[in-house]
Amino acid sequence: MDQPHGLIDQLIKHRNRDRLVDTAARLIDAPSPTGQAGKACDRLAEILEADGFAVDRPDGGHPDAPAVVARFDSGSPGPTLQFNGHLDTVHLPFVPARVEDGLLKGSGASDMKGGVAAAVEALRMLRDSGALTAGAILLTAHDLHEAPWGDGRQLDALIRAGIVGDAVLLPEPLHGVLPTDGRGSATWKVRISRAGPPVHEVMRPTDEPSVIAVGADLVARLNRFDAQLAAEVNPVCGSASVFIGQIHSGEIYNQYPQECRLEGTRRWLPGTDGRAAEPEFRALLAELASTTGTQIECDWQFIRDAFHLDQDHPFVSIFQESCERVSNRRLPLGGKPFVDDGNSFWALAGVPAITHGPNAGGQHTISEWAEIADMERVALLYAVAAVGYCGSGTDRTEDEEWPQPAPYPI
């Protein structure tokens, strides 16, 4: 396969490392815990408008942080490729942006403001190079991504309103594989309680159950349930599961507590009904409450449905070809270990969504980082993939030549 040096060289001429890093740093320095990402959304809108892009701000049912929507149209018919990212971060102490040893650090650097900045740089490269000869780019960014503070409803509202491309790229920090399948996810919080108040252990009532013992019983039941779910296996993304991550009860060592609280997750496989997981879980709790004489309440939060990527879609082969042109290799196929916005694009719109971002780490910690050189690679990859997908339509075979960029206007 011949490498399209003309296209890549032309795009690289319009990639600006300092501008890319400055964009990411400015986004990081706008604190944006989930549900409160308005400042970061405003900052991105300001950056795009200063670059000359028209920006829309649909609120998607979340007026405290309206989403950011920018479009770049080539002026000729063709598919629309969407770059999508979230600007909210998990609720941890804020860390400002800094550059150190080739890494960009700070809150959201890896998850996923570094990736969003790379997508913005790709948008600039496509416009300034004249490489996009057909089709359009849709760039979207939003709040309410990170669970348990967000549930994805802002993006879901945008998708239902038709703000969606024909294919989607998401610069989450996953770069070593092309994810084709991923589990859906929900979180649960269970509260087991008895009628009486907390008392000293020697004063405990003989006619009321031990909430800790019932909590232990629930742990055992969920472990057995998890073993049953393990029989449901997807060869790419593993098995369905129920997981217990926290258990709390009592205030001191010799108190007979009134309640026991447990928290965890429930994950299911592509092709199964994720909505059926909740009534099944609640039925298990109801049976336990009935046999133990306790009250059991459950807060269930549906996060994202399962994910599947149709490997026969033309965009998948174009993306792999773009990886080979940029990095001299195609990505091995693999599972998506987390849930992200790609799950929603697949479930709600049926469009192919590929998660691929820069080499990064420290997600959901105070030590996030993204490799700047790889942010540059992602920007170039997104631009090359856009030319291949939008500029050639969806019927091009791999043997056909890619379109060359129009001469850059003087």
Image (cartoon, rainbow, N blue to C red):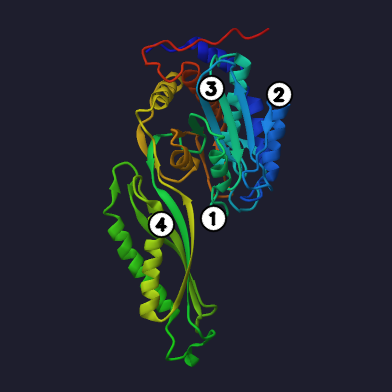
Are there few (<14), some (14-19), or many (20+) residues within 10 Å of tag 3?
many
Above or below residue 346? Residue 321 is above
Instruction: Kindly report the distance in space between the C-alpha atoms of the residues bearing marks 4 and 3.
Output: 37 Å
Above or below residue 367? Residue 24 is above
The residue tagged 2 is: 52
Specify the amino acid type for callout 2: Gly
Q: Quadrant of residue 394?
A: top left
State the image coordinates of residue 240 (x, y, percent, origin top left). Answer: 34, 52
The residue tagged 3 is: 383
Q: Is residue 51 left or right of residue 343?
A: right
Which comes sooner in the sequence, label 4 or label 3? 4
The residue tagged 4 is: 266
Specify the amino acid type for callout 1: Pro
The residue tagged 1 is: 148
Specify the amino acid type for callout 3: Ala
Question: What residue lies at 53% left-to-right and 20% top-to-bottom?
Answer: 135
State the image coordinates of residue 341 (x, y, percent, origin top left). Answer: 50, 41
Quarter of the image with the N terminus is top left
